[in-house]
Amino acid sequence: MILKPGNPWGFITGKLSLNPTQALAMFGFTMRPDAQGVIFRTYTYLDDNNRKKRGTFISNYVPPSNPQTEAQQANRQEFASAVSSWQGLTSGRQKYFNELAVKRHLAMSGFNLYVSKYLKGLL
């Protein structure tokens, strides 16, 4: 549910944890019976005419899962290796990747570009 700007209570920014009963009392909507809380976050989004708008999204809190699978652990190790490799580069080489990201008009830093290439096996 997106609460539109201009509601009499205004925007709720940040994160606010409520139990379902409190949410119901404050806003008059019901939550799933197994809900442990409610998360309120303010987002910026584009409307149909590509104008920037802000709205508050309300959702049930769901704890993040951490299955500790073998594949997940391998991915974490590979990412850690990529970060370690970046840290082992000379400052000149790091500067090269930072400039390359700017030159190619990429929406990422040189670090992100390097890690992306490392994980794809392009380095």
Image: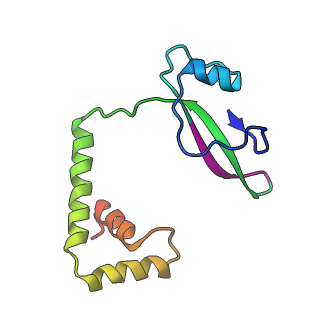
Q: Tell which of 30 and 51 is nearer to you.
A: 30
Q: Is residue 2 left or right of residue 88?
A: right
- Residue at horizontal 55%, vertical 45%? 14
Q: As displayed, is residue 17 above or below residue 32?
A: below
Q: Position of residue 74 (x, y in %)?
A: 22, 46
- Whole-percent x and y of residue 6? 79, 44
Q: As rendered, which of 4 and 69 lies closer to the eye?
A: 4
Name which residue lies at 27% across and 56% down. Answer: 79
Place of residue 9 in the rendered image (x, y in percent of width and height, measured from the top left)? 73, 38
Nearest to the observer: residue 110 or residue 40: 40
Picture layout, residue 97 above or below residue 79: below
Instruction: Quadrant for residue 111, please give it.
Output: bottom left
The total number of labels drawn is 0
Was residue 113 drawn as part of the magenta stretch in this picture?
no
- Residue at 26% from the left image edge and 48% from the top image edge: 75
- Secondary structure, magenta segment, majority class: strand
Q: Is residue 34 left or right of residue 24?
A: left
Q: Is residue 44 magenta?
A: yes
The image quarter in which residue 95 lies: bottom left
Q: Quadrant of the N terminus?
A: top right
Image location of residue 112, percent across then percent down: 38, 66
Q: Quadrant of the C terminus?
A: bottom left
Q: Which residues are magenta?
A: 40-48
* Of residues 48 and 56, the one drawn nearer to the viewer in this rendering: 56
